[in-house]
Image (tube, helix red, strand yellow):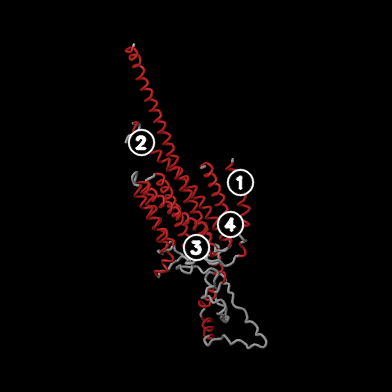
Amino acid sequence: MRRILIPLLAACAAAGLAGTLYLVFYVTKLEQNLFFNQKIFYWHVPNWFMLFSMVFLCGGASIGYLVKRDPKWDDVAHAAGELAVLFGAIGLVTGSIWGKAAWGHWWIWELRLTTSLILWLTMLGYALVRRFAGPGSEPLCAGLAIFGMVNVPLVYFAVKLADKLGQASAHPKAKVVAQLDASMKGTFWLSVLTFAAVCALLFLVRIDAIRDARRLRAVRERGLDAGILEP
Amino acid sequence: MRTLVSIVTLSLSLSVVAPAWAQPAADAGPAAPTAGAPDPAAGPAAPTAGAPDPAAGSAAIRPAPPAEPPAPPPSGEAPVCRLAGPPPPVEPGKPAPPSQHSAMRQVCEDELIKDHDWWWNLVARLRTSDHNQTAREIVTNKRHVVAAYAAIWLLAVGFVLIMWRRQQAMKLEIARLEDQLRKVEEEDAKRKAAKAKPAAPKDDGGAS
C-alpha cells in the first residue's frame, strides 16, 4: 500500500505544484486591490492550512499517546510536529515578504501575526525538545503539542478578537475565500489540494524515518548488550 | 511502471483541465481582498495603485504660461505635463457653467511667472510618467512575489534534504550495527559449537 501511495502522492504533488504555478501566473485574474502581490496568497494560505492541520494532528496524537501510552501515537505526533515547524516557517517568511510588499513593513505587532509567531515558537520548542531531550521526554512533548493545538483557534479568530478589543488589524475581517472570483477560487483550492498532497507525502516519509530511528535505538541497545558498543 | 502511468495521466489531465478551468486573465474584474492577505487600507504604507495622486490635481491647476519660458530643471530632462484641455462646449439651451476663476488666480499666475522653482515643482508633480511608473511597479511587483515563491521552494527543499541526509545516515548506521551484531552472534555460535565439540567424546566415553 505504502509503496503505491508514496509515488502517487509525489506525482500528485509535482503535477499540482507545476499546475498551480501555471494557473497563478498565467490564468487567474489580477486582483484589483493588491494587484500582483496577491499572487503570494495562492501558496501562502494553503501553507497555513497545512500548519493548522499538522498542529491539530500533533495535539490529537499527543492526547492519544497520553491516554494509551502507545508509541505509534507518539510517532504520529513527532512527524506532525516537525511538519508544523516547516509549514509555519514557510507561512511566516512568505507573509513577511507579502507584508513588505503591501504594507511597507516586514513585520508589525498585530494580533494575528503575534499569535502566529507564538504558535510557531511553541511548535519549534516541541521539535527542539523532541530532538535534544532524549528518551522519556514524550509526555512533556505531548503537553507542548496540546498547548500548541489550543493556540490554533486563537490565531484563526485573532482578527475578530482584535476587532472586539478595539485594536486595528491589518488582515481583512471578511471571509475572503468565499468572496474570491471563480478562477481564483479554482486555483486556490487546487493549491490547497496540492499542499495537502505535499504534506501527506512528507508525513509518510517522516513516519518512516521516525520508525527507522526507533529501530536504530533498538539495534544500539542490542549492540550494548552484545558488547560491541560502549555506553 | 504503474507509477509512471499515473504520473503521465495526471500531468496530461492537469494540462488539459487547468487552462480551461480559469477564465482568461485579460478581463480582470474587481475582486475581494484575499484571506490572510494584508489589508492595504489598514497598513501603514498601503499602496494606492493606479490611483492618481490627489496632490497632483491633474486638471485643476492651469497656470498661465510665463512671459518667458522658465529655465529647464537642473537634470536637463524636459518634463512631461499633461494639462487639461479646453472646457467642453456648452450645450444649447443649457446655462453656461459658472466661471472657475477664483479671486486669487491672477495672484497665483503672477507669482508663478516670478517663481520658476514653483512652476517646475508644479509641473513635476503633474508628470504622468512618474505616476504610471509607480502604478506599474505596484501592479507588476514581481520582486516580492518571486522572493516569496523562492522562499517556499528553498525551505521545503532544505527540509527534505536535511531529513533525507539524516535518514540515510541512520540507515547506514543500522546496517553497520546489524552487520556487527550478526558477526558477533556468528562468532558466539562458533565458540559455543567449539566448546561443545571437545566435550562430546568425553561424555560419550563416560557413557560407554
Q: Which residue is mark 4?
A: A23
Judge by depth and name the residue closer to the eye, A39 or B22.
B22
Q: Earlier in the sequence, mark 3 or mark 1?
A: 1
Tag 4: Cα neighbours inside 10 Å, few (<14), some, or many (≥20)?
many
Callout 2 touching callout 4 (CB < 8 Å): no
Measure the C-alpha gap from mark 2 to mark 1.
46 Å
At label 4, the amino acid type is Leu
Residue at (63, 81) in percent of width and height: B86
- Apparent side of residue B67 relative to residue B207 in the rendered image (left or right): right
Q: In terms of secondary structure, where does tag 2 sit?
A: helix
Q: Which residue is mark 3?
A: B35
Q: Which residue is mark 1?
A: B8
Q: Is residue B48 visible?
A: yes
At label 3, the amino acid type is Ala
Query: Compared to B147, does A166 lie above or below?
Result: below
At label 2, the amino acid type is Glu
Measure the C-alpha gap from mark 4 to mark 3.
18 Å
Q: Chain of mark 2?
A: A
Measure the C-alpha gap from mark 3 to mark 1.
33 Å
